[in-house]
Amino acid sequence: MNFSDEGYIIHLRRHGENALIVTLLSREHGKITGYVQGALSKKKLGIFQLGNALSFNAYARLEENMPSLRGVELVKAHAANFMQSPEKLAVLESFCALFDAAVAEKENLEFLAESVDAFFEALDTSQWLNKYALAEFRLLDFLGIGLDLSCCAATGTRENLAFVSPKSGKAVCLDAGLPYADKLFRFPYAVVDKNYAPSLSEVADLLKLTGYFLNKNFFQIHNLQFPNNRATLLEQLNLMHIEGK
């Protein structure tokens, strides 16, 4: 096996005195875990940080073997953006833990590539948290547990959709859902309208929705532990502080 690609670092594990086991999300070859010799040298240490985008060559004698990642070069140092903000760092740790746990090795990630790229490219904008929430929503579709937001589950109408049912994962219109509003999720308008600019509270509601369905319909079904970094994300985020930035 021998190929070249680019990807975002989502997991790092020390191996021996100066090597790392590195997991990346790559566009062409999916999630890749490989061995990097000399990664802990002073010269290279800044390269290997969560969130950084790297280019690399992967080599293994046999397909089933862990590849050696060679010729690694930094494409973009996203980690610097996260380190300057505790809120962004919490989101990065959630992103990495969630995608590492949910995505299988070498699984085709073309479906997710656009939303993942959009998240990292939005770090210097006010939309970074919204783009993260949208990436999680896209992950639901990728895992085969996408929600039906096309029409009201109770009436069939496509008008005045205001809620999402936690039981069915389907949209509910305002009239049908209002009596049960405290038991329903808020309808994610940002998901169905790319030009919609959600408020911070709407982004928080979307994160509640995606977290609930990811845990219930994927992690619990597969007897997997929902990543703690994601489970506590909303508690870690100081939303009022973010809103004031």
Image (cartoon, rainbow, N blue to C red):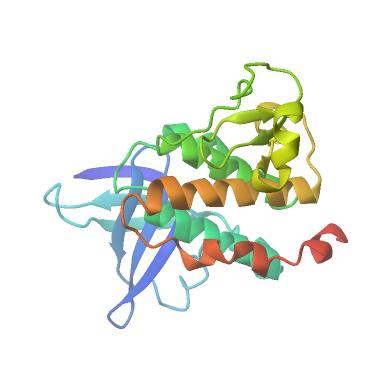
- Work out whether residue 80 can be spotted: no
Give the image location of residue 104, x and y in percent: 31, 47
Question: In the visual, does 148 lie left or right of 190?
Answer: left
Q: Is residue 156 above or below residue 137?
A: above
Residue 225 image offset from top left, x and y in percent: 38, 63
The answer to whether residue 193 of the structure is visible from this angle is yes
Residue at x 53% of width, y 37% of height: 138
Q: Is residue 96 above or below residue 179?
A: below
Q: Nearer the viewer, residue 190 or 16?
A: 190
Farthest right residue? 244
Q: Residue furthest left?
A: 62
What quarter of the picture does the N terminus occupy? top left
Residue 68 placement (x, y as % from top left): 25, 59
Picture quarter containing residue 71?
bottom left
Residue drawn at (80%, 37%), measured in percent from left and top? 197
Q: Position of residue 7 (x, y in %)?
A: 44, 48
Q: Locate residue 93: give its quadrant.
A: bottom right
Check the picture and name the quadrant holding the C terminus.
bottom right
Front-most of 115 and 207?
207
Relative to 36, residue 73 above or below: above
Q: Residue furthest top?
A: 157
Location of residue 143 with respect to 44 vertically, above or below: above
Total marks in image: 0
Name the residue furthest front: 179
Residue lying at 46% horizontally and 53% vertically, measured from the top left = 215
